[in-house]
Image: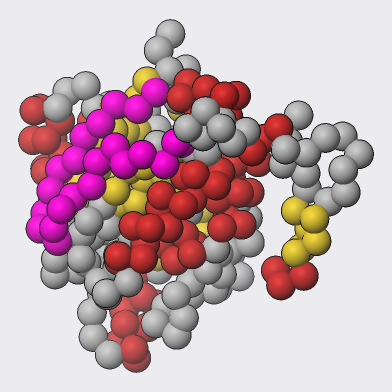
Amino acid sequence: MSASLYILTLQAPARTPDTAVESLRDELKELLADFPQTELVVCPEYHTVDVEGTPAERAAAYEQLAEPLGGPRVTGLKAVARELGSWLIPGTVIERGPNGELFNTAVAISPDGELAAAYRKIFPWRPFEPFDPGSEFTIFEIPGKGKVGLAICYDLWFPEVARNLAYLGADLIVYPFQTSTRDREHELVLARATAIQSQVFVLSANAAAPSGTGQSILVDPDGIVRYTAVSENPAVLTDVIDFETVERVRRVGTAGMNRLWDQSRNGDPAVQLPFYRGTMPPLSRD
């Protein structure tokens, strides 16, 4: 059984909501005809729910687009994954929570069309995003491969998100993005830093122009860039990652030096994080 995973990242503009699922299906069918080895497709944030306008107009549009995860949009995306026979992270959707909340939610769908995981963005980019924050970390397992953590865009600026996903067992963290601002350069640095700090694969899939500034990036657990899109233009980025690399890097250390997961011993005190009103346990998952 191979622990390698063939990933296709679609750097593309966000799609008009009314036709987004159908147009995504058509494009992915063509792409996977050229890349039949694909096992996981990743799309940017808001990929099927493009919204523009003033803050009030955006908020009104989000309210209209919001659906429970059993609604028509996710149901349609499940059908796309089933038809493709591939794992699908179709960016994020606007979720109506059980108590009327409004969430920016990343979903992961299995090749048989089942909702494998859903993650509500913990750190909305305020005041631009009028969403309620999520409160739970989310990972899912691709059988025979490894575990994937979900986070979204601005979450990358908060290292505790990645660290908690790593504690839960994530080998790869996927961040759908829709960054259209000049801080994309900072996010490229943060992607490498996050991969190094938690010794995980990090995939930051950004939208293409005009929705975003592109420059999607995949970083391995040593902090080495596997690929990056060099512009804001639409692009299709592919790679095969080996989940066993995570175990190797954690065992021998980053660049053969830093074994972060062996840092703490039983009986070491937990580190207090008063700024985040929490406690970080010792750096061991044993």
Q: Is residue 108 visible?
A: no
Residue 203, placed above or below residue 15:
above
Q: Nearer the viewer, residue 18 or 121?
A: 121
In-image side of 227 versus 170 (left or right) = left
Count of marks overlaid on the render: 0
Q: Position of residue 26 (x, y in %)?
A: 11, 43
Q: Position of residue 142 (x, y in %)?
A: 46, 27
Q: Residue at x 61, y 49 (%)?
A: 163
Q: Quadrant of the C terminus?
A: top right
Q: Residue at x 37, y 62 (%)?
A: 187
Residue 235, placed above or below residue 160:
above
Q: Nearer the viewer, residue 71 or 58?
A: 58
In-image side of 277 versus 162 (left or right) = right
Which residue extends farthest front? 257
Q: Give the image quarter of residue 92.
A: bottom left
Which residue extends farthest right? 267
Q: How is the image coloured?
A: secondary structure
Q: Position of residue 267 (x, y in %)?
A: 91, 39
Q: Give the image quarter of residue 207.
A: bottom left
Q: Nearer the viewer, residue 216 or 97?
A: 216
Q: Residue at x 30, y 65 (%)?
A: 185
Q: Residue at x 75, y 53 (%)?
A: 280
Q: Nearer the viewer, residue 250 or 78?
A: 250
Q: Position of residue 99 (x, y in %)?
A: 61, 70
**Residue 9 belongs to the span the image colors magenta:** no
Q: Give the image quarter of residue 52.
A: bottom left
Q: Is residue 153 visible?
A: yes
Q: Quadrant of the N terminus?
A: top left
In-image side of 210 versus 111 (left or right) = left
> Start and end of the magenta stretch?
221-242
